[in-house]
């Protein structure tokens, strides 16, 4: 039987399957056995209580949903006192995602969350709907470097950094995060999107813009994971469009060590454990002893990677 365990820095996951932040809660244990997951990832929290974005907060598309939830929550004190103990009842490591509008508060939040039952801090520097222009710390190298440097100075916890697919050059952003002290990169958050209703000519979301989640986005995020994996030495978690075991395999072949699942869990909460079972069966059928054998194992050494050079060769 295949060994599904993977290491993300100093953290060992029993398998590479975890929920994406914002698509999960400890209440899922009513439907699936949370102890089977590789990690538990809490919804992004902010310092103060937040009501979230104006409604409507979700809009359907032909191949997914656009969501603009707005990080509602009861603040960090409530989270530490009431939510962390609920997650602590389960065995997988707890990843706590945080977001702020200032570097100083980002760092302070990380320090305050450095408590025993929190295993990993995920710096969500990428949320596309906190700012309607899509602006965030993950859009620029300097902002990313300054933010992660400040957070790293305030916590000894493993630090995962969630990047934005909306950045013009995600490889440069990833390298800046690594240089500033990130232990892992989470690629990527949702794609800034817009839907307009044809019955009243108004945006379908109360916040106008939202983040698109869709299986159709997997090839785009997969390309980002592949490109970043060639340029950094720290682990990568691929997030975007995972709906089946073969998607996990693709991400790992591209260089990811694990994956986060969002949309599939919305559609079917049991998908997370089903994908674990299917991944195990997929590996066993092919005689793969350790799932880590798949990481970065894409066979492309003989292929030209520069599209300009490739185009000049012709067919």
Image (cartoon, helix red, strand yellow):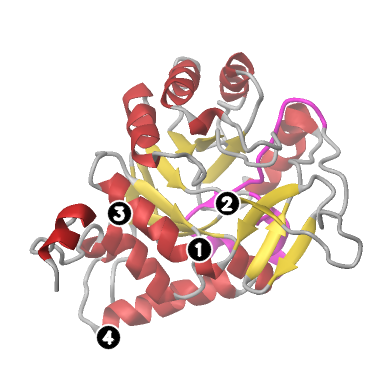
Q: Which of marks 2 and 3 is nearer the N terminus?
A: 2
State the mark number for residue 120. none
User: In what quadrant of the picture does the N terminus appear?
Assistant: bottom left
**Are the residues at dot 1 and dot 2 in contact (C-beta closer than 8 Å)?**
yes
Q: Which of marks 4 and 1 is nearer the N terminus?
A: 1
Q: Which of marks 2 and 3 is in front?
A: 2
Q: Which of marks 3 and 1 is nearer the N terminus?
A: 1
Q: Nearer the viewer, residue 84 or 182?
A: 182
Q: SS of the residue at dot 3?
A: helix
The magenta segment: 22-49
Q: Name the residue under label 1.
A: 217
Say whether residue 18 is visible. Answer: yes
Please give left or right for residue 129 compared with residue 218 in the image: right
Q: Position of residue 283 (x, y in %)?
A: 29, 77
Asked if residue 46 is among those painted magenta in the image, a careful observer would answer: yes
- Rounded to the nearest whole Å, what is the CA distance between mark 2 and mark 4? 35 Å
Q: Earlier in the sequence, mark 1 or mark 2?
A: 2
Q: Which of marks 4 and 1 is in front?
A: 1
Q: Main secondary structure of the magenta part?
A: loop
- Rounded to the nearest whole Å, what is the CA distance between mark 3 and mark 1? 14 Å
Which of the 4 image quarters holds residue 45?
top right
Mark 4 Cα shell of 10 Å, populated few (<14), some (14-19), many (≥20): few
**Are the residues at dot 2 and dot 3 in contact (C-beta closer than 8 Å)?**
no
Q: Which of 236 and 142 is in front in this view?
A: 142
Q: Which of marks 2 and 4 is nearer the N terminus?
A: 2
Q: Mark 3 points at which residue?
A: 226
Q: Name the residue under label 4.
A: 285
Q: Position of residue 147 (x, y in %)?
A: 50, 21
Please give left or right for residue 282 compared with residue 309 in the image: right
| In this view, 129 is above or below 201 | above
């Amino acid at each position: 039987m295949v060994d599904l365990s993977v290491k993300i820095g100093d953290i060992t996951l029993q398998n590479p399957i975890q929920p994406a932040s914002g698509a999960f809660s400890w209440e899922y244990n009513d439907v699936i056995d949370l102890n089977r997951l590789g990690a538990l990832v809490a919804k992004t929290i902010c310092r103060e209580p937040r009501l979230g974005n104006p409604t409507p907060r979700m809009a359907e598309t032909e191949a997914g949903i656009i969501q603009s939830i707005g990080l509602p929550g009861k603040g960090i004190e409530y989270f530490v006192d009431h939510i962390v103990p609920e997650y602590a009842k389960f065995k997988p490591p707890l990843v706590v995602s945080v977001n702020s509008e200032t570097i100083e508060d980002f760092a302070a939040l990380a320090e305050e969350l450095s408590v025993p039952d929190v295993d990993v801090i995920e710096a969500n520097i990428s949320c596309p709907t906190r700012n309607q222009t899509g602006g965030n710390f993950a859009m620029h190298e300097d902002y990313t470097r300054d933010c992660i440097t400040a957070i790293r100075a305030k916590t000894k916890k493993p630090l995962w950094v969630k990047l934005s697919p909306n950045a013009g050059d995600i490889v440069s952003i990833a390298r800046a995060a690594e240089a500033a002290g990130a232990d892992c990169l989470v690629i990527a958050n949702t794609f800034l999107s817009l839907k307009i209703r044809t019955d009243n000519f108004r945006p379908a979301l109360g916040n106008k813009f939202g983040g698109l989640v869709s299986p159709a986005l997997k090839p785009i995020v997969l390309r980002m994971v592949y490109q970043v994996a060639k340029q950094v030495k720290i682990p990568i978690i691929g997030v975007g469009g995972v709906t089946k075991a073969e998607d996990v395999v693709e991400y790992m072949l591209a260089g990811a060590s694990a994956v986060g699942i969002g949309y599939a869990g919305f559609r079917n909460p049991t998908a997370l454990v089903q994908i674990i079972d299917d991944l195990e069966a997929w590996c066993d059928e092919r005689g793969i002893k350790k799932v880590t054998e798949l990481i970065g194992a894409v066979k492309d050494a003989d292929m030209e990677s520069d599209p300009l050079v490739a185009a000049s060769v012709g067919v």
